[in-house]
Image: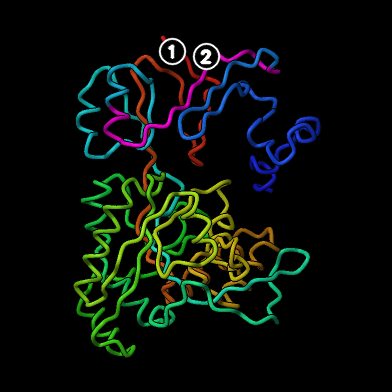
Amino acid sequence: MTSLAMFTVCMVSPANAEQWGEDAFKHPSGTGPFKFVEWVKDDHITLEANDDYWRESPKLDKLIFRVIEDASARLMALQTNEIQGMEYPDPSSFDVIEADSDLQLLTEPGMNVGYLAINCGYGYTDSNENGVHDLDEPWVETPGYSEPLTNKKVRQAINHAIDKNSIVDNLYKGTAIVAKNGMPPFMLGYNDDVEDYSYDPAEATKLLTEAGYPNGFTSTLWVMPVSRPYMFDPPKIGEAIQGYLAAVNITVDIYQVDWATYLEKTEAGEHPMCLLGWTGDNGDPDNFMNVLYGENACSIGTAGNVAFYNNSRVQEVLSAALQTYDTTERANYYEEAQMLLHENASHVYLAHSNQNVVFTSNVHGYVLHPTSRKFFYPVTIE
């Protein structure tokens, strides 16, 4: 039921779709409090108040969303009143923001997870008419197939090699909590009995030796070029991970590409390892567990499970959780899935990050939303 309330199932104007065809996304039409005016790619989007809105008109006449890639430049624009709000502030600037009476910092726990996905090596290329993988069809190697990473002990070694507490303390700067499971701890079915991988380079080296790689190996880590709600500074996190893995003789080259290409190629499984994450859409655990870790989400080219971790038992319990209204039963299924995922180490779960947004002090009425979506209808400016 939660999925029926998602924006992805909203009604679409037939007239607008017919007029613009495949370019309809460039000309959005809806019934909300603001209406589309202009989109200049990589620069800005302009909206204006919808006088025909079914409720009272919004208090703001116009909304402009600008693209300012650098966090320090965003903050400077905010301090000079060039803009009135910004997202993804650099945590190192929080003291400056909180000391400025003309600014206000809004923060709350986010419904997200940031992770390192380790390509387990196999996906599938076809699905049946319902979009579900036919489990009788053979798995195929992903383009980013790397023999060491298909070994469970190697993946466990990678988990032990990375100091997540240090990453959260020094790079997230305390604006997140360390993650040990693939969904936030406040969600139904979170398994707190899972014992996280400790930071233990000696254990990592031991596991690599047992796996047949006593001298380590070479691989590539794909690193996002942009800030996301679950990971403010991916390049610095990538460099930190590179250093931790080097300490156990895993030599990692860092690869970056533009964001759109990054998403396209990781969905196609071209990476050996990659940094990514997820912000929940509806508050239901299925929106994390099935989307990110299910066997049916391993389709090469459209994968949500970019670790390409295929485990029929995990998919079995995730599917069973969708077929019952009993919350206790559902929780048990998700708990089992998390234990299996932990054991097989397809991901290094890094952090659950807070949401952080900064406004000038004359902006009132903005409320942070768990999904990180932006709602400006109740907002006013003095």
Residue that sits furthest to the top in the current view: 382
Element on which disc 1 rests? strand
> Which corner quadrant of the image does residue 245 belong to?
bottom left
Q: Magenta includes 112?
A: no
Element on which disc 2 rests? loop
Please name the amino acid that badge 1 sits on: Ile
Residue 181, percent from left and from top: 42, 63
Structural crowding at the residue carrying mark 1, measured as other residues with C-alpha within 10 Å and reported as few (<14), some (14–19) or many (≥20): few
Residue occupied by mark 1: 381
> Which corner quadrant of the image does residue 101 belong to?
top left
The residue at 19%/72% (across/down) is 247
Structural crowding at the residue carrying mark 2, measured as other residues with C-alpha within 10 Å and reported as few (<14), some (14–19) or many (≥20): some
Residue 351 sits above or below residue 28 on the image: below
The residue at 26%/40% (across/down) is 91
* Label number found at residue 60: 2
The residue at 47%/60% (across/down) is 190
Closer to the camera in the image, 375 or 233: 233
Residue 355 sits above or below residue 311 on the image: above
Using residue 103 as the reference point, say whether residue 333 is left or right of it. right
Counting residues from the N terminus, which is met first, the one under dot 2 or under dot 1? Answer: 2
> Which corner quadrant of the image does residue 298 belong to?
bottom right
Using residue 365 as the reference point, say whether residue 330 is left or right of it. right
Residue 98, percent from left and from top: 24, 27
Residue at mark 2 to residue at mark 1: CA–CA distance: 8 Å
The residue at 51%/34% (across/down) is 41
Start and end of the magenta stretch? 53-75
Residue 120, percent from left and from top: 47, 75
Q: Magenta includes 73?
A: yes
Please name the amino acid that badge 2 sits on: Leu
The quarter of the image holding the C terminus is top left
